[in-house]
Image (cartoon, helix red, strand yellow):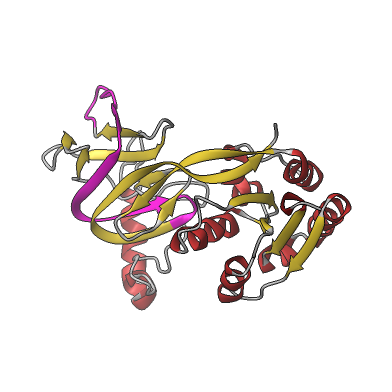
Amino acid sequence: MSARDQLLVVIDPVARRTDGESVRIAKDVLGAGAGVRVCLPESPEEFTKALVRRGARRPVVVGDDTALLRAVGVLHRERALASAVLSVVPVGSAASAVRLSRGLGVPAGAVAAARAVLDGAPRRLDLLVDDRDGVVLGDVLIPPVGPAGAGGGVPGADGHGEAGSGERHPWLRTCQSLVRTLAVRPSRVVPGGPSRLRVEADGVTLVDLDQPVEGVSVRPGGAGFARVEVHPASVGAEVAPVRARARSVTVSGPDFRYRADAVVTGPVRSRTWHVRAQAWGLVLPR
């Protein structure tokens, strides 16, 4: 049996809790077509150790987007992305939990995804690496809107890991509720309102601090470039978005948060993302 037929199947504990039936199906399909060593980590540390000690086996992650991101992050820190090729069987509690995997081309359903692990082919994909050595497979969104909603994944209502001020002072919560009731809602709601940010693509300023923006997105665009899209704030008439392709993107300004794939980070005052062309491999259907 070749190394390609030897699999290390790392089953994320969240997948085991949320959809044990899909996990069982994936194990059965993979076990019928390859030599399988199953690992059941109970913590991120055990998850990391399993991947680091994979030997010649091909790593297969059974879990949601968070598990996939953790696996890519581990291999990136180990400087093993160039040699390792990942496979994933998406298992999550909701469609939003596996949206990234689906967007990358992984089939839906445990049977189809497991068959792709066995019969598919590796494809090299670009990713973004930020100046803190974090990896992004899908997209960066500023402000951090996305499947989990605005502010999803942020520990506290005020974004600083504490309860919001309304929870600390009930009288203030009452006043805030009254203000929200009396306020005139704008036709286009942007979480947090327009931000003043400087966005630079390969050193060229696309928008500066004097131009409020409603949103910024950065995502791998293929061929070693990122696609950058900036939506300037508009008063009355719509303003066309500013688009660019770049190998390096820097966003800076007053404190801001961003969503990188499924993870919300911040507040930060500056972050730079660099494109790594064909930096990682994922097994996809032929």
User: Where residue 80 appears, x then y in whole percent?
Assistant: 50, 57
Residue at the extreme front of the image, as rendered: 2
Q: Residue at the location (84% across, 59% down)?
A: 24
Q: Is residue 135 visible?
A: yes
Q: Residue at the location (66% across, 49% down)?
A: 87
Q: Name the quarter where the C terminus is drawn.
A: top right
Magenta-drawn stretch contains 215 = no
Q: Residue at the location (56% across, 59% down)?
A: 71
User: Where residue 282 appears, x then y in whole percent?
Assistant: 60, 44
Q: Nearer the viewer, residue 238 or 70?
A: 70
Q: Quadrant of residue 237?
A: top left
Query: On the rendered structure, is 23 left or right of 215?
Result: right
User: Where residue 94 appears, x then y in whole percent?
Assistant: 66, 51
Count the numbered circles shown: 0
**Residue 214 vertical placement versus 90 (above, below):** above
User: Where residue 136 appears, x then y in whole percent?
Assistant: 43, 49
Q: Quadrant of residue 115?
A: top right
Q: Nearer the viewer, residue 147 or 89?
A: 89
Main secondary structure type of the part rendered in magenta: strand
Q: Quadrant of residue 27?
A: bottom right
Residue at the extreme left of the image, as rendered: 210
Q: Is residue 181 visible?
A: no
- What range is drawn magenta here? 234-263
**Residue 108 vertical placement versus 52 (above, below):** above
Magenta-drawn stretch contains 238 = yes
Q: Nearer the viewer, residue 262 or 156?
A: 262
